[in-house]
Image (cartoon, rainbow, N blue to C red):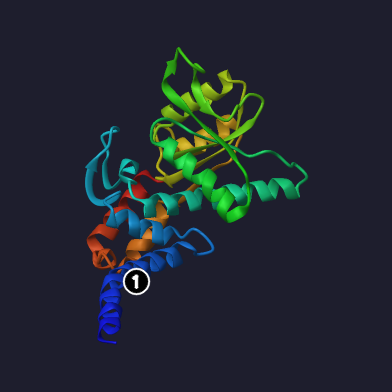
């Protein structure tokens, strides 16, 4: 009997850490099973992971920006999952609307090398898991492959397809125009563009790069989060965990930047 009790005690001690880890995992799973993408949740995670920073940053344009978004640091499973859920929800909304209008179409999504590759792969999975949409996906190589299957495109055959392009941030629009050219050379057309963040600021003209792209390509360009969401985050209690909402100076800087350069 004593031996049985000792064995039970030892087994309990052995499994206790596993149950503790299980509780942590289930907590994360529960949080990520929210019905829709939350811009405030994404902003919070971006701050926690240094993807989004508030301060003073010199942009290529020479402007002093009060914030900086570095998509290269979207390097955790939680961040990538939430971002992919945002892309997937936005895409599903577009596809459902098109189908309701009688324009049923196959969904093909594309990510530009290199940052766009994990985005598009994770989004294809999120579309299937959360929306039952079996999207095809692909990406480009920076340098064309001369052996094996060759070429500079990998994944879905985009020829003759209307393709949705995923990107992190569009600043001047130069990189996106290169992606459009790559797709057109492969016989595809662009159905629309979805970006993680829209800075909503004008370039040389009075329009933003996103507005110019939307007008030039005559396609929808959507963003998961924009500068107005960042300002809202700073202004209300969603920033409580980081204390950002208490920083009236930072909020004022964001509002001033929006007024000075915003569209």
Q: Is residue 222 visible?
A: no
Who is closer to the viewer here, 77 or 41? 77
In what quadrant of the picture does the C terminus appear? top left
Q: Position of residue 87 (x, y in %)?
A: 51, 48
Q: Residue at x 41, y 55 (%)?
A: 228
Q: Percent position (x, y) of residue 154?
A: 50, 26
Left or right of 108? Residue 261 is left
Q: Quadrant of residue 69?
A: top left
**Above or below, comparing residue 102 to residue 114 in the picture:** below
Q: Position of residue 119 (x, y in %)?
A: 45, 42
- Helix, strand or loop under label 1: helix
Nearer to me, 259 or 65: 65
In the picture of the structure, the residue carrying the numbered disc 1 is 19
As drawn, 20 above or below 100: below
Would you identify the image quadrant in which residue 71 lies?
A: top left
* In-image side of 157 versus 230 (left or right): right
Q: Position of residue 231 (x, y in %)?
A: 36, 58
Furthest residue in direction right, as rendered:
102
For the point 49% across and 27% down, the residue is 179
* Left or right of 134 in this view: 37: left
The N terminus appears in which quarter of the rendering? bottom left
């Amino acid at each position: 009997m004593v031996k049985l009790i000792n064995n039970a005690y030892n087994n309990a001690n052995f499994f206790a850490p596993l149950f503790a880890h299980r509780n942590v995992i289930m907590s994360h799973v529960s949080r990520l099973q929210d019905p829709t993408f939350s811009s405030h949740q994404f902003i919070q995670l971006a701050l926690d992971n240094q993807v989004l920073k508030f301060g003073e940053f010199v942009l290529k344009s020479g402007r002093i920006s009060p914030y900086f978004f570095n998509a290269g640091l979207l390097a955790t499973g939680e961040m990538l999952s939430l971002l992919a859920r945002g892309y997937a929800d936005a895409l599903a909304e577009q596809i459902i609307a098109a189908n309701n209008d009688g324009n049923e179409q196959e969904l093909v999504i594309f990510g530009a090398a290199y940052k766009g590759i994990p985005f598009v792969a994770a989004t294809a999975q999120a579309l299937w898991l959360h929306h039952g949409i079996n999207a095809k996906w692909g990406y480009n190589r920076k340098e064309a492959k001369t052996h094996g299957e060759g070429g500079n495109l990998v994944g879905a055959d985009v020829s003759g397809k209307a393709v949705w392009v995923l990107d992190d941030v569009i600043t001047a629009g130069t990189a996106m125009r290169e992606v459009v050219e790559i797709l057109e050379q492969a016989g595809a057309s662009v159905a629309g563009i979805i970006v993680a963040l829209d800075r909503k600021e004008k370039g040389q003209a009075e329009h933003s790069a996103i507005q110019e792209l939307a007008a030039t390509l005559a396609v929808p360009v959507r963003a998961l989060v924009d500068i107005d969401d960042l300002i809202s985050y700073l202004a209300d209690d969603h920033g409580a965990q980081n204390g950002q909402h208490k920083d009236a100076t930072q909020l004022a800087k964001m509002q001033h930047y929006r007024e000075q350069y915003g569209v």
